[in-house]
Amino acid sequence: MKILLVDDDTLITESFEIILSSDADFEIVGTCENGKEAVDFVKVNEVDIVLMDIRMPVMDGIEACAKIKELKPEVKVIMLTTFRDFRHVHQALHAKANGYLLKSDEVKRQMHTIKNVFNGQAIISEEALKEFTSAKMVALLTERENDCMELIAHGYSNKEIARRLYIGEGTVRNVISIILDKLSLRDRTQIAIYYWQTKDDE
C-alpha cells in the first residue's frame, strides 16, 4: 500500500518512514510538512493512505483531511497525533477521517491499524477512544437517543425502531438527526461504528 507521511516535524516523518519501510506491505511514496502540501501531493500522485498530524502550519490536518476526502474519497486518511481529547477526535470524524492513531501507541498496534484501515475498517486508538467516550457518550445523549442508537447498531429500520420505541417514524428520523448532530457523525453507519466501539470499551 502506498503511504504519504504528513508532519511538520521531520524527525517524526523520518522515524515513521524507517519503521514502516521494514514491512513489505508498506511503500512510502512521499512526505509533506503541512496539510496544503499533502492536498497538492494527493492531487497528482497515487496514494492509498495518508498518515497525518493534526497541528501543522499553513493548513492543519483536519482541514487537509476534509479536502483530501472531497477530492479523492477512496484515499484513506489516518490522523496520527498526540491529541487524545474529545474535540479533536470529533473534528477528525467530522472531516471523514478513516482512523485516529496516537503517536504514543505501540508500533505494532500502529502498523496493524494502518492495515485494517486499508482493508476498510474505521479505527480509533484505544487511548483516544477512552477520552472520546468518557467525555460525552452518556451525558450528551438522552435515554431515547441512546435507545435509538442501540437499535440502529443492531440493524433495525426506522419503521422497526418506531414500533419498538412506540414513537412515529418521523420522530425516529428527527432523533437520528439529533444524534448525528450531537456526535458530529455523518450517517447511520457511523452511528453503528460509534456504538460498537464504545460498547467494546466498556
Image (cartoon, rainbow, N blue to C red):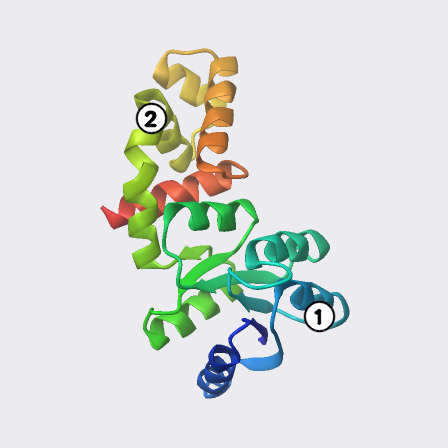
Report the residue that reaches farthest toward the right.
44
Asked if 185 appears above or below 39 in the picture, the reply is above
Residue 137 position by quadrant: top left
Q: Position of residue 97 (x, y in %)?
A: 53, 54
Kindly identify which residue carries mark 2. Answer: 147
Tell me: residue 78, above or below residue 145: below
Direction from residue 141 to residue 40 in the image, left or right: right
On the image, the x and y values in percent for residue 85 come to: 37, 50
**Depicted 140 relative to depicted 159: above or below:** below
The quadrant the N terminus occupies is: bottom right
Residue 95 seen from this side: yes
Q: Looking at numbered disc 1 in the image, what kind of residue is underneath it? A: Phe
155 or 172, which is in the foreground?
172
Residue at left offset 42%, top offset 40%:
192
Q: Residues within 10 Å of mark 1 (few under 14, many from 20)?
A: some
Examine the image and state in which quarter residue 84 appears: bottom left
* Badge 1 vs badge 2, beta-carbon distance below 8 Å: no
Q: Amino acid at mark 2?
A: Asp
Question: Local crowd at mark 2 within 10 Å, few (<14), some, or many (≥20)?
Answer: some
Q: Which residue is mark 1?
A: 41
| Vertical arrangement, residue 157 with respect to residue 32, above or below | above
Horizontal side of 195 relative to 3 (left or right) equals left
Q: Disc 1 to disc 2, how far (Cα)?
A: 44 Å
User: Tag 2 or tag 1, which sits nearer the N-term?
Assistant: 1
- Residue 139: image quadrant is top left
Residue in the image at 39% along x and 37% along y: 153
198 vs 55, left or right, is left
Residue found 31% across the figure and 41% down from its top: 135
